[in-house]
Image (spheres, rainbow, N blue to C red):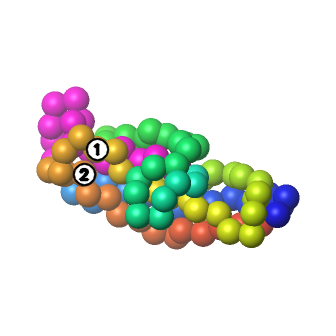
Amino acid sequence: VGKEYTFYFYANNAITVVEPNNLYDPVIRIRQGGDIDLPNGVLREGPAVLTEDNTALNGSGWVRFEYTFIATSSSEIIKITNAAEGTRGDDLALTSLGILGN
């Protein structure tokens, strides 16, 4: 409690589906709190759209996300949610998830 932490991960658009206006690309959000089984809680970061273009520009395809917070209890709920509008191409890959004490 009272200590600063950074939650981080890398995400990539897992499949290539070219649609007008990036309609079906993953839309990443980091949320804190809320119910364990629901995509609710306070929006802390995002939305960030993982288009085929912005993941390719990164070189490796992986985009780093992070959120720094101060613990207010002995446990915290932090969620990665995908707010894509459709289910045709909203697939994403995650790697290197972690929490660092700062």
Asked if the magenta segment contains residue 98, the reply would be no
Q: Is residue 8 left or right of residue 79?
A: right
- What residue span does the magenta drawing correspond to? 16-31
The residue beneath circle 2 is 90
Place residue 14 in its image quadrant. bottom left
Give yes or no for contact between labels 2 and 1 (Cβ–Cβ under 8 Å).
yes
Q: Residue 84 carries which label?
A: 1
Q: Residues within 10 Å of mark 1 (few under 14, many from 20)?
A: many
- The CA span between labels 2 and 1 is 6 Å
Asked if the magenta segment contains residue 29, the reply would be yes
Q: In this view, does 95 lie above or below 78?
A: below
Task: Identify the residue at image location x=54%, y=68%.
Answer: 97
Mark 2: amino acid: Asp
Q: In this view, does 41 lie to the left or right of 38?
A: right
Query: Helix or strand or loop: what does disc 2 sit on?
Result: loop
User: From the image, which quarter does the N terminus lie in?
Assistant: bottom right
Residue placed most toward the observer, 33 or 69? 33
Is residue 61 shown to the viewer in this render? no
Q: Where's residue 41, x and y in %?
A: 52, 49
